Amino acid sequence: MTCPGIRETRVCHVRFRLVCRWLNAKTYSTIIVFPGHRPLPIEFAMFLILLNYVRPLAEVDRFVVAHREFLERNYAAGRFVISGRKEPRTGGVILANLASRAEAERVIEEDPFKREGVAEYEIIEFVASMAAPTLANLKEA
Protein backbone atom coordinates (compact mmCIF):
# COMPACT_ATOMS: atom_id res chain seq x y z
CA MET A 1 0.00 0.00 0.00
CA THR A 2 1.38 3.38 -0.98
CA CYS A 3 0.29 6.81 0.15
CA PRO A 4 0.39 9.19 -2.83
CA GLY A 5 1.01 12.32 -0.72
CA ILE A 6 -0.42 15.52 -2.18
CA ARG A 7 -1.55 15.61 -5.78
CA GLU A 8 -3.11 18.57 -7.61
CA THR A 9 -5.60 17.62 -10.29
CA ARG A 10 -8.53 18.88 -12.36
CA VAL A 11 -11.84 17.33 -13.38
CA CYS A 12 -14.17 19.25 -15.70
CA HIS A 13 -12.13 22.44 -15.14
CA VAL A 14 -12.49 22.14 -11.34
CA ARG A 15 -9.15 22.27 -9.54
CA PHE A 16 -8.72 20.33 -6.29
CA ARG A 17 -6.09 18.54 -4.25
CA LEU A 18 -6.03 14.95 -3.07
CA VAL A 19 -4.15 14.86 0.23
CA CYS A 20 -2.97 11.63 1.77
CA ARG A 21 -1.69 11.37 5.35
CA TRP A 22 -0.36 8.30 7.14
CA LEU A 23 -2.36 7.56 10.30
CA ASN A 24 0.02 4.85 11.51
CA ALA A 25 2.47 2.36 10.00
CA LYS A 26 -0.28 0.46 8.15
CA THR A 27 -3.12 2.86 7.31
CA TYR A 28 -3.55 6.24 5.73
CA SER A 29 -6.40 8.66 5.19
CA THR A 30 -7.18 10.48 1.98
CA ILE A 31 -9.11 13.73 1.76
CA ILE A 32 -10.21 15.89 -1.13
CA VAL A 33 -9.68 19.65 -0.86
CA PHE A 34 -11.47 22.13 -3.13
CA PRO A 35 -10.05 25.68 -2.96
CA GLY A 36 -11.88 27.66 -0.28
CA HIS A 37 -13.76 24.62 1.09
CA ARG A 38 -13.43 22.41 4.12
CA PRO A 39 -11.56 19.16 3.40
CA LEU A 40 -13.79 16.13 2.78
CA PRO A 41 -12.41 13.24 4.85
CA ILE A 42 -13.29 9.66 4.06
CA GLU A 43 -14.69 9.29 7.59
CA PHE A 44 -17.70 11.44 6.73
CA ALA A 45 -20.89 9.77 5.51
CA MET A 46 -22.38 10.28 2.08
CA PHE A 47 -25.98 11.40 1.78
CA LEU A 48 -28.29 11.68 -1.19
CA ILE A 49 -30.91 14.30 -0.37
CA LEU A 50 -33.98 14.25 -2.60
CA LEU A 51 -36.32 17.25 -2.69
CA ASN A 52 -39.88 16.90 -3.99
CA TYR A 53 -41.94 20.02 -4.56
CA VAL A 54 -45.32 19.89 -2.82
CA ARG A 55 -46.52 23.34 -3.92
CA PRO A 56 -47.00 24.83 -7.41
CA LEU A 57 -43.86 26.02 -9.23
CA ALA A 58 -45.03 29.63 -9.02
CA GLU A 59 -44.82 29.36 -5.24
CA VAL A 60 -41.50 27.47 -5.34
CA ASP A 61 -40.03 30.18 -7.59
CA ARG A 62 -40.62 32.81 -4.90
CA PHE A 63 -37.92 31.11 -2.78
CA VAL A 64 -35.37 30.10 -5.44
CA VAL A 65 -32.96 32.99 -4.70
CA ALA A 66 -32.96 32.20 -0.96
CA HIS A 67 -32.57 28.48 -1.70
CA ARG A 68 -29.54 29.16 -3.93
CA GLU A 69 -27.97 31.25 -1.14
CA PHE A 70 -28.55 28.28 1.19
CA LEU A 71 -26.79 26.01 -1.33
CA GLU A 72 -23.87 28.44 -1.71
CA ARG A 73 -23.37 28.61 2.08
CA ASN A 74 -23.23 24.82 2.27
CA TYR A 75 -20.83 24.54 -0.66
CA ALA A 76 -18.60 27.14 1.01
CA ALA A 77 -18.71 25.11 4.23
CA GLY A 78 -17.72 21.98 2.28
CA ARG A 79 -20.95 20.10 3.05
CA PHE A 80 -22.33 19.75 -0.47
CA VAL A 81 -20.55 17.94 -3.30
CA ILE A 82 -22.98 18.46 -6.19
CA SER A 83 -26.62 19.45 -6.63
CA GLY A 84 -29.20 20.21 -9.28
CA ARG A 85 -32.86 20.19 -10.16
CA LYS A 86 -34.77 17.16 -11.33
CA GLU A 87 -35.93 16.93 -14.92
CA PRO A 88 -38.82 17.38 -15.28
CA ARG A 89 -38.74 20.10 -12.63
CA THR A 90 -40.41 18.31 -9.72
CA GLY A 91 -37.69 18.90 -7.12
CA GLY A 92 -33.96 18.59 -6.72
CA VAL A 93 -31.05 16.38 -5.71
CA ILE A 94 -28.14 17.15 -3.39
CA LEU A 95 -25.12 14.92 -2.81
CA ALA A 96 -23.69 15.79 0.58
CA ASN A 97 -20.67 14.71 2.62
CA LEU A 98 -21.62 15.15 6.28
CA ALA A 99 -20.61 13.88 9.70
CA SER A 100 -23.98 12.26 10.49
CA ARG A 101 -27.63 11.92 9.60
CA ALA A 102 -28.37 14.39 12.42
CA GLU A 103 -26.18 16.96 10.65
CA ALA A 104 -28.04 16.27 7.37
CA GLU A 105 -31.37 16.86 9.11
CA ARG A 106 -30.08 20.05 10.75
CA VAL A 107 -28.79 21.40 7.43
CA ILE A 108 -32.10 20.68 5.69
CA GLU A 109 -34.00 22.62 8.36
CA GLU A 110 -32.08 25.74 7.21
CA ASP A 111 -33.31 25.42 3.60
CA PRO A 112 -35.91 28.07 2.71
CA PHE A 113 -37.78 25.45 0.67
CA LYS A 114 -38.22 23.42 3.87
CA ARG A 115 -38.95 26.43 6.07
CA GLU A 116 -41.63 27.70 3.67
CA GLY A 117 -43.17 24.25 3.15
CA VAL A 118 -42.72 24.11 -0.61
CA ALA A 119 -40.66 20.89 -0.62
CA GLU A 120 -40.45 17.59 1.23
CA TYR A 121 -37.11 15.85 1.74
CA GLU A 122 -35.85 12.29 1.70
CA ILE A 123 -32.41 11.59 3.14
CA ILE A 124 -30.62 8.49 1.93
CA GLU A 125 -27.36 7.63 3.66
CA PHE A 126 -25.13 5.36 1.64
CA VAL A 127 -21.72 3.77 1.73
CA ALA A 128 -19.80 4.72 -1.39
CA SER A 129 -18.17 1.46 -2.45
CA MET A 130 -17.13 2.58 -5.95
CA ALA A 131 -16.15 5.97 -7.32
CA ALA A 132 -14.35 7.62 -10.21
CA PRO A 133 -10.61 7.75 -9.48
CA THR A 134 -10.78 11.48 -8.77
CA LEU A 135 -13.43 10.89 -6.07
CA ALA A 136 -11.97 7.69 -4.62
CA ASN A 137 -11.52 9.34 -1.21
CA LEU A 138 -15.31 9.41 -0.79
CA LYS A 139 -15.73 5.63 -0.82
CA GLU A 140 -15.43 3.43 2.24
CA ALA A 141 -12.10 1.62 2.50
Image (spheres, helix red, strand yellow):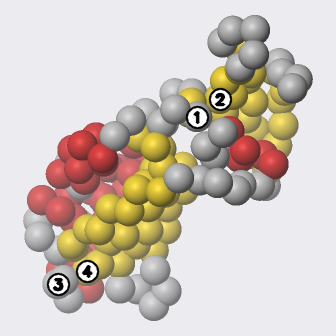
Residue annotated with mark 4? 53
The local crowd at label 4, few if under 14, some if 14 to 19, many if 20 or more residues have their Cα within 10 Å, is some
Residue 31, numbered circle: 2
Looking at the picture, does residue 4 appear above or below residue 94?
A: above
Can the viewer see residue 113? Answer: yes
Residue 90 lies, in percent from the top left, at: 35, 85
Spatial CA distance of label 4 from label 3 is 6 Å
Residue annotated with mark 3? 55
Q: Residue at x 53, y 53 (%)?
A: 127
Spatial CA distance of label 2 from label 4 is 34 Å
Q: Residue at x 37, y 70 (%)?
A: 50
- The answer to which of marks 1 and 2 sits earlier in the sequence is 2
Residue 64 lies, in percent from the top left, at: 30, 66
In this rendered view, identify the residue nearer to me: 68 or 37.
37
Spatial CA distance of label 1 from label 3 is 37 Å
Q: Residue at x 67, y 24 (%)?
A: 29
In this rendered view, identify the residue nearer to me: 115 or 48.
48
Quarter of the figure that contains the C terminus: top right
Residue 42, numbered circle: 1
Query: Outermost residue, front direction?
Result: 26
Badge 2 element = strand
Q: Amino acid at mark 2?
A: Ile
Q: Amino acid at mark 4?
A: Tyr
Contact, CB < 8 Å: mark 1 with mark 2? Answer: yes
Badge nearest the viewer, 1 or 3: 1
Q: Amino acid at mark 1?
A: Ile
Can the viewer see residue 107? Answer: no
Badge nearest the viewer, 3 or 2: 2
Spatial CA distance of label 1 from label 2 is 6 Å
